[in-house]
Amino acid sequence: MTKTCDRTEFEQMDIFGIGEPNPWGEFFSGASFLKFLTAEGCAASVANVSFEPGCRNNWHVHNATSGGGQVLICTAGEGWYQEWGKLAQSLVPGTVVTIPAGVKHWHGAKAGSWFSHLAVEVPGEEASNEWLEPVSDEEYAALA
């Protein structure tokens, strides 16, 4: 069962801080927040991404000709991660997800919970992020 909490309670659990409204918010259903933890120019970008209840990002792919991909380290609240063609995986604090380059996926908060994860962009050759279609409300509502 998903634990619920309001934003004030969540901010006390989110040890890295919620940050500012996500500048890539157009690729999210709902409000998300971003706080970079590494300095610009660092070989590996690390950011704390926070999602309001029900918020999720669009399907997307981290492309690279070699290396690349993403690592998610869940830090607060409860969320979902799903790869294209596979069942969604429940995320709780301490869950680590390794996403190889080229894998279509999405991640976000469960309907009743704020959620935060560290997003580590794995360095790679010709690395880029390709945003795709939103996760439909029907697909999302079917998760239990």
Image (spheres, rainbow, N blue to C red):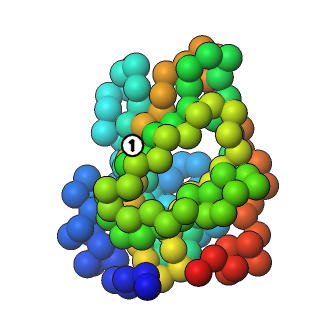
The quarter of the displayed image where residue 89 is located: bottom right
Please indicate, yes or no, whether residue 66 appears anywhere in the rendered image. Answer: yes
- Residue 48 appears at what percent x and percent y? 37, 49
- Residue 71 appears at what percent x and percent y? 46, 40
Instruction: Check the picture and name the quadrant holding the N terminus.
Output: bottom left
Q: Residues within 10 Å of mark 1 (few under 14, many from 20)?
A: many
Going 40% across and 49% down the picture, which residue do you hit?
Answer: 96
- Identify which residue, 41 or 81, lies in the foreground: 81
Q: Is residue 86 above or below residue 104?
A: below
The residue beneath circle 1 is 47
Provide the secondary structure element on which disc 1 rests: strand
Residue 111 shown left or right of residue 138 in the figure: left
- Residue 34 appears at what percent x and percent y? 42, 51
- Identify which residue, 26 or 121, lies in the foreground: 121
Residue 68 shown left or right of residue 41 in the figure: right
Instruction: Check the picture and name the quadrant holding the C terminus.
Output: bottom right
Tally the marks: 1
Q: Is residue 40 above or below residue 19?
A: above
- Residue 117 appears at what percent x and percent y? 40, 54
Q: Amino acid at mark 1?
A: Ala
Going 73% across and 52% down the picture, which residue do you hit?
Answer: 84
Going 63% across and 76% down the picture, which residue do you hit?
Answer: 143
Going 27% across and 78% down the picture, which residue do you hit?
Answer: 8
Q: Is residue 14 above or below residue 122?
A: below
- Identify which residue, 71 or 54, lies in the foreground: 71
Please indicate, yes or no, whether residue 26 appears anywhere in the rendered image. Answer: no
The quarter of the displayed image where residue 82 is located: bottom right
Residue 142 shown left or right of residue 30 in the figure: right
The quarter of the displayed image where residue 74 is located: bottom left
Q: Is residue 44 above or below residue 79?
A: above
